[in-house]
Image (tube, rainbow, N blue to C red):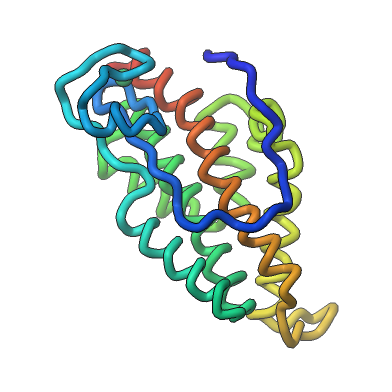
Amino acid sequence: MKQKSIPHTTHNGPPAAEAPSYFQCPECGFLSADARFGAGEVPCPDCHSSGARPRAFPSDRLRRLDERIRHYNAEGDWEVVVILAETFLESILEDIIDRILAAHGADVTVRSVVLDGQRAIGARIGRLFPALTGEEFEEVAAELGFRDFPHRWRVLRGARNAFIHDSPFHGPQEKLDPATAHEAMILLDQAYKLFVLINNRFVADGFGKHGR
Ligand SMILES: [Zn+2]
């Protein structure tokens, strides 16, 4: 288990201009932001292997979704920003759980069976994540410097749900305001940092333990 000092990165400034770029070591699964590693100029900062070309993270699919969210945010289309950002957060969680499963030695079939068996986001966070990592998502987020992320994500999910579904208790929420969209953008930017740290803690370690 890697215990590195993690700066507290919660901030409320303007959103980033674009998705960050990370590169995943094909040997150990470690994600690095070092472009020289991505270009194959330096070895993996974690396992020091070199040779095999690192894979890009986020995936092209997530990067395209990210671009669209930033576009709609610039256009002031707050409803679409919140709905797509929530979709993005659920997708990046699925991506990281898939990587953790792979690090446990699960092949593609097992991974799709597990993920299809737990489609609801609440069950993925509340049951699947702790089953695979041995820790609650909230604890891990706090340890990695993102203590308020799980709660803020739940609040955002609630706002999205109230907008797209009629609630028998509160009635429909007619619109999503700019503040909710701004919150969605903050969580979008934080999600990359948090999920890279989760990857490096559980995936990179898992690759080392279980082989590939
Ligand atoms: Zn490596």
Query: With 4 as the anchor, is 51 left or right in this view?
Result: left
- Give 209 or 184, whichever is nearer the viewer: 184
Quarter of the render that holds ligand 1 = top left
| Residue at the image point whose x is 80% and y is 85% from the top | 171
| Residue at the image point whose x is 72% and y is 74% from the top | 178
Instruction: Locate residue 144, reporting x and y percent.
Output: 64, 28
Quarter of the image holding residue 62? bottom left
Query: With 49 as the anchor, is 21 left or right in this view?
Result: right
- Whether 167 is drawn above or below 18: the answer is below
Quarter of the image holding residue 23? top left
- Whether 174 is drawn above or below 108: the answer is below
Q: Is residue 19 visible?
A: yes
- Whether 25 is drawn above or below 66: the answer is above
| Residue at the image point whose x is 64% and y is 24% from the top | 6
Query: With 43 as the anchor, is 119 left or right in this view?
Result: right
Instruction: Locate residue 192, reporting x and y percent.
Output: 51, 44
